Image: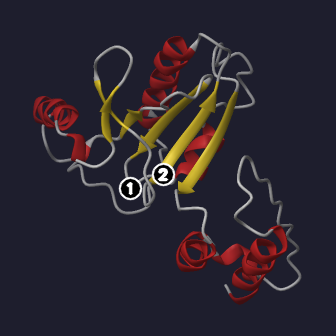
Amino acid sequence: MAGRRFNRHGKSAVAPQPGMRNIILTTCARGQEARCTAELGQIIDRLFDTEDADFTVGPESSDQSLSFAKRIEQEVSGLKDRRVRKYHALDAGELKCIVLVQLSEKFDCNLAAARMFPQSDPFAARFCQRVIPIQLIVKAEIADIRTHLPSVIHSPFSQPGRKFAVIYESRLNESLDRSTVIELVADVVGTA
């Protein structure tokens, strides 16, 4: 499998690859990655366990007519199968202070990230500092950005009178021209 490698603890991990979707990037203090991962797992479990988990993209696949024991059995078998898991951790590689979690395709990472830390509970997280949803990973090439950008731009931008800003930040990459990227994003948003 492309992207599979072993982390510093000898466990198999999947590295982020172009084409991956629904990733939540979380920052933490140096040396607190393991605690942040555990805390993030608890927060996401709590988020998925709420009755009003309306951040799903499609219809929920669980049948409510099944008995409680059958639903638990299905959930346990789903935890063993990576394809039906609600989320799994990704390997951040040599990046320190970063924890990556990939959500299942049926969940919207933007809504999930917005609801992870409710304003009613400011102390919900001790080790997670910042949460950034990543809809899609693409290569830093204009052709790839042009190809994949329409799939992540949603209709709220196309409402008349709606204003938006394109913020371009480049880290360790001089291959992209700032003005070209901004014009490309503005053109796609304007036609969405």
Label disc, if present, on residue 122 of the rendered structure: none
Left or right, 41 with reference to 177: left
Cα gap from disc 2 to disc 1, whole angstroms: 7 Å
In the rendered image, which residue does mark 1 sit on?
105
Quadrant of the frame with the C terminus: bottom right
Taking depth in this image into account, of 36 and 168 the one nearest to the observer is 168
Q: Please state which amino acid type lies under the numbered disc 1.
A: Glu
Q: What residue lies at 85% left-to-right and 70% top-to-bottom?
A: 164
Circle 2 residues within 10 Å: few <14, some 14–19, many ≥20: many
Q: Residue at x 61, y 62 (%)?
A: 140
Question: Foreground residue, 167 or 172?
Answer: 172
N-term-proximal mark, 2 vs 1: 2
Q: Amino acid at mark 2?
A: Asn
At x 86%, y 67%, the residue is 165
Identify whether 126 is placed above or below 25. above
Quarter of the image where one finds residue 153 = bottom right
Up the image or down, 192 lies above or below 181; here it is below
Q: Nearer the viewer, residue 65 or 10?
A: 10
What residue is disc 2 on? 22
Judge left or right: residue 188 versus residue 53.
right
Tell me where residue 82 appears, x and y as whole percent.
23, 40
**Way the structure is coloured:** secondary structure
- Residue at the spot x=78%, y=70% of the render? 177
Residue 147 appears at what percent x and percent y?
A: 53, 79
Q: Secondary structure at mark 2?
A: strand
- Please say if the residues under marks 2 and 1 sit with CB atoms less than 8 Å apart: yes
Q: Position of residue 103 (x, y in %)?
A: 42, 44
Looking at the image, residue 11 lies above or below residue 113: above
